[in-house]
Amino acid sequence: MRDYGAAGASAETVSVANSSDVVSARQMVRNLAQRGGLSLVHQTKLVTAASELGRNMLIYGAGGVVRAAAVRDGGRSGVFVEFADQGPGIEDIELAMTDGWTSGNGMGLGLSGAKRLVDEFEIESGPGGTTVRIVKWGR
């Protein structure tokens, strides 16, 4: 994935420590998608993915930071979102990305479902935490 995080000063940030912070992060992402001209369908997909990833970050990573920015690539515009926590990490990313697998009480569709909803998806994880980066492009 291209380093869209370099949007730097234009990036918006929400610290996530509780469920109301997940709602704030989701609203930040929705606002960026609306301002970026994403269709309602693409807005909904992006916000759903952000909600799942923010919730996972809170439950499994004990919270973290969501950073988002409007991005451009040639003639298209989109929204980049990064979810970073300092939790224990994901032991087996390949397994965690498998539909139906869960380490908790969920349905096991969070990571894999979020990946299907966006155009670009990247995950890095280790003992120091997990970072997920996504991009949803407007059409």
Image: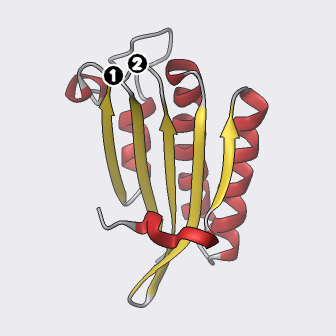
Query: Are there few (<14), some (14-19), or many (20+) residues within 10 Å of tag 2?
Result: some
Q: Which mark is residue 89?
A: none
Location of mark 1 (residue): 127
Q: Are the residues tagged 2 and 1 within 8 Å (C-beta)?
A: yes
- Residue 52, located in which quarter of the rendered image? top right
Q: Position of residue 128 (x, y in %)?
A: 38, 27
How is the model colour-coded? secondary structure
Could you tell me which residue is drawn at 61 percent across and 61 percent down? 43
Q: Position of residue 78 (x, y in %)?
A: 50, 72
Q: Nearer the viewer, residue 60 or 109?
A: 60
Could you tell me which residue is drawn at 62 percent across and 76 percent down? 36
In this rendering, the answer to whether 105 lies above or below 46 is above
Asked whether, in this view, residue 125 is left or right of residue 44, the answer is left
Q: Which mark is residue 88?
A: 2
Asked whether, in this view, residue 32 is left or right of residue 123, the answer is right
Asked whether, in this view, residue 119 is left or right of residue 27, the answer is left
Mark 1 belongs to which amino acid?
Pro
Could you tell me which residue is drawn at 49 percent across and 50 percent down? 82
What is the CA distance from the residue labelled 2 to the residue labelled 1? 5 Å
Q: Position of residue 70 (x, y in %)?
A: 57, 72
Quarter containing the N terminus: bottom left
In this rendering, the answer to whether 106 lies above or below 68 is above
In this rendering, the answer to whether 51 lies above or below 56 is below
Q: Secondary structure at mark 2?
A: loop
